[in-house]
Image (tube, rainbow, N blue to C red):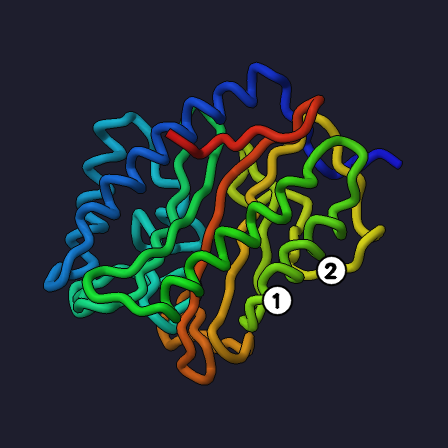
């Protein structure tokens, strides 16, 4: 069955997304280097704005549904969509997630990384590693003809075997001319279910992993999702294209 609501991209459009994705990766790397104890998050947000001008991209999230910043920065128990404000200051030991989207030549890409600033711990490093490993476990299956549920199942399995929890109220998504396009990509699922992948699909796959419960709440700012129990969280994301022989990650330098 054809996935009629999903926009397939041409090789030329995928190459444009790859060019934009390389710029995004550079911006994320430079933003990560800016993160240090004592730095307020608004300083990093302003820095990202200057990098967008340098690399000739637009921040995809700025003004998206009235989101007020260039980048999402989430700390510790915050899972996603953290607003980088002046009153939030990084301290040593913070788990920091940077989630950034770039619009280049009419196409969006999206990527997220999580890391510890300053003093870390085995738990924090395992949590961060698990998010990345679960991403890799899922995307290794990506190729035309595979069902989306198989990928979601592998992501969940990798997280659960590490004794962490999979966030279930948030998901990955298709991406391209819009930041969010079909399909929705849950980080949990059953094998043999879901849409069938086709060459030309472009997907933002983004496992979100929590230390304890996967239950979240929305903070008063109307954007930031955090864990109900205060447990730590990790987020890892790349944009990729489904190609003839498998997949191609578009948001790497």
In the rendered image, the residue lying farthest to the bottom is 229
Q: Where 173 falls versus 37 (above or below)?
A: above
Query: How packed is label 2: few (under 14 Cα within 10 Å), some, or many (20 or more)?
Result: many
Side of 31 where 14 appears, left or right? right
Q: Disc number at residue 135? A: none
Of residues 48 and 140, the one nearer the viewer is: 140
Of residues 10 and 37, the one nearer the viewer is: 37
Q: Quadrant of the C terminus?
A: top left
- Mark toward the viewer: 1 or 2: 1
Residue 154 in the image, given as x and y percentages of width and height: 68, 54
Q: Are marks 1 and 2 in contact (CB under 8 Å)?
A: no
For the point 44% across and 56% down, the residue is: 129
Residue 54 in the image, given as x and y percentages of width and height: 21, 28
For the point 76% across and 31% down, the residue is: 144
Side of 78 where 188 appears, left or right? right
For the point 62% across and 42% down, the residue is: 139
Indicate which disc, 1 or 2, sits on the residue closer to the N terminus: 1
| Residue labelled with disc 1 | 161
| Residue labelled with disc 2 | 189
């Amino acid at each position: 069955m054809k996935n009629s609501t999903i926009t397939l991209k041409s090789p030329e459009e995928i190459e444009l997304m790859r060019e934009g994705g390389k710029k995004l990766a550079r911006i994320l790397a430079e933003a990560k280097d800016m993160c240090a104890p004592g730095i307020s998050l608004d300083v990093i947000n302003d820095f990202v704005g200057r990098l967008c001008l340098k690399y000739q991209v637009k921040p995809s999230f700025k003004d998206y549904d009235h989101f007020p910043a260039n980048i999402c920065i989430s700390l510790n128990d915050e899972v996603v969509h953290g607003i980088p404000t002046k009153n939030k200051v990084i301290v040593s030991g913070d788990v920091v997630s940077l989630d950034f989207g770039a619009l280049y030549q009419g196409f969006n890409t999206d990527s997220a990384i999580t890391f510890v600033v300053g003093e870390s711990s085995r738990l924090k490093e395992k949590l961060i590693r698990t998010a990345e490993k679960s991403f890799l476990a899922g995307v290794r299956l990506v190729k035309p003809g595979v069902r989306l549920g198989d990928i979601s199942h592998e992501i969940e399995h990798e997280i659960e075997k590490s004794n962490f929890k999979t966030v279930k109220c948030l998901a990955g998504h298709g991406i391209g001319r819009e930041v969010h396009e079909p399909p929705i990509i849950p980080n949990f699922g059953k094998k043999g279910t879901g849409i069938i992948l086709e060459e030309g699909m472009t997907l933002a796959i983004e496992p979100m992993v929590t230390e304890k419960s996967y239950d979240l709440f929305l903070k008063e700012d109307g954007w930031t999702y955090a864990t109900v129990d205060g447990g730590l969280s990790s987020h890892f994301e790349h944009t990729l294209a489904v190609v003839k022989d498998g997949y191609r990650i578009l948001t790497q330098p």
